[in-house]
């Protein structure tokens, strides 16, 4: 802190991030419709009036949650998908493993469940999630598959279909954890699922030359 700078300034500048972090937990726990701005303000330790200084609506808060807490992970996947100068199989293992770790250690699952459950009544939630999360992840995997095909490592076929095949079991594992484990179903280790699945899918994707 610069000498003479008011002590409250750092706290004031931190408030948007604190509000977004609180919103992430409230949305994941209560859903969008049931989440109240009063709850989010209380969780962030600010007044409702202070919250309105930074965010006008719950929709604004949801968009900020996605862009602050989730999008940075997506950007990392996007960059790595094309930047890694390694065989396709190794890059895919690393990316899927990283994605599994994010799903296992963050509140993203609760938010994803909320979007699925409430998107019919709140279509803007689905639009933000599609544009900022789902489509970006899918496009990054499609680009990686296309790169692998150009290098002769991946069999000919629809890259988008391959990308869905790669991603879908992780989404199933996530929904299993968020929907069924709370009512007593056996837990699912998402990282173990990812490792098992990626070896199975690589068995079908790789060309004979890439297996050598």
Image (cartoon, grey):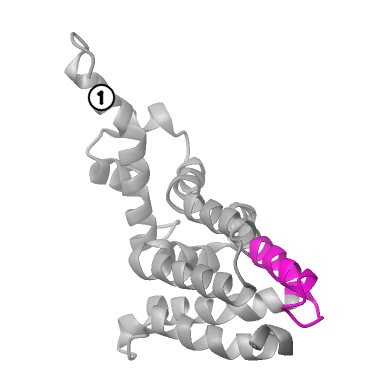
Mark 1 is surrounded, within 10 Å at the Cα level, by few (under 14), some (14 to 19) or many (20 or more) other residues, namely few
Quadrant (top left/top right/bottom left/bottom right) for the N terminus = top left
Name the residue that disc number 1 marks: 10
Quadrant (top left/top right/bottom left/bottom right) for the C terminus = bottom right
Residue shown at 44%/72% (left/top)? 100
* 96 to 122, vertically: above or below: below
Q: Is residue 137 left or right of residue 209?
A: left
Residue 122 seen in the current view: no
Is the magenta region chiefly helix, strand or loop?
helix
* 34 to 188, vertically: above or below: above
Q: Is residue 59 left or right of residue 43?
A: right
Viewer-nearest residue: 99 or 169: 99
What's the magenta region?
Answer: 138-160
Whole-percent x and y of residue 81?
A: 61, 61
Q: Residue furthest top?
A: 4
Viewer-nearest residue: 118 or 4: 4
């Amino acid at each position: 802190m610069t000498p003479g700078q008011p002590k409250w300034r750092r706290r004031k500048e931190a408030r948007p991030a604190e509000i977004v972090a609180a919103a992430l937990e409230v949305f994941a726990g209560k859903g969008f419709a049931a989440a109240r701005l009063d709850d989010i303000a209380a969780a962030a330790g600010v007044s409702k009036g202070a919250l309105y200084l930074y965010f006008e609506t719950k929709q604004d808060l949801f968009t900020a949650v996605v862009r602050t807490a989730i999008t940075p992970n997506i950007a990392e996947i996007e960059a790595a998908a094309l930047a890694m100068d390694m065989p396709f199989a190794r890059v895919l293992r690393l990316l899927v493993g990283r994605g599994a770790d994010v799903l296992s250690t963050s509140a993203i699952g609760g938010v994803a469940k909320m979007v699925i459950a409430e998107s019919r009544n709140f279509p803007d939630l689905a639009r933000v999630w599609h544009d900022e999360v789902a489509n970006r992840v899918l496009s990054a995997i499609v680009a990686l598959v296309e790169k692998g095909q150009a290098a002769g490592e991946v069999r000919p076929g629809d890259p988008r279909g391959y990308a869905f095949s790669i991603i879908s079991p992780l989404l199933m594992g996530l929904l299993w954890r968020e929907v069924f484990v709370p009512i007593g179903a056996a837990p699912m280790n998402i990282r173990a699922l990812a490792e098992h699945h990626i070896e199975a899918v690589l068995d079908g994707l790789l060309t004979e030359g890439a297996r050598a």
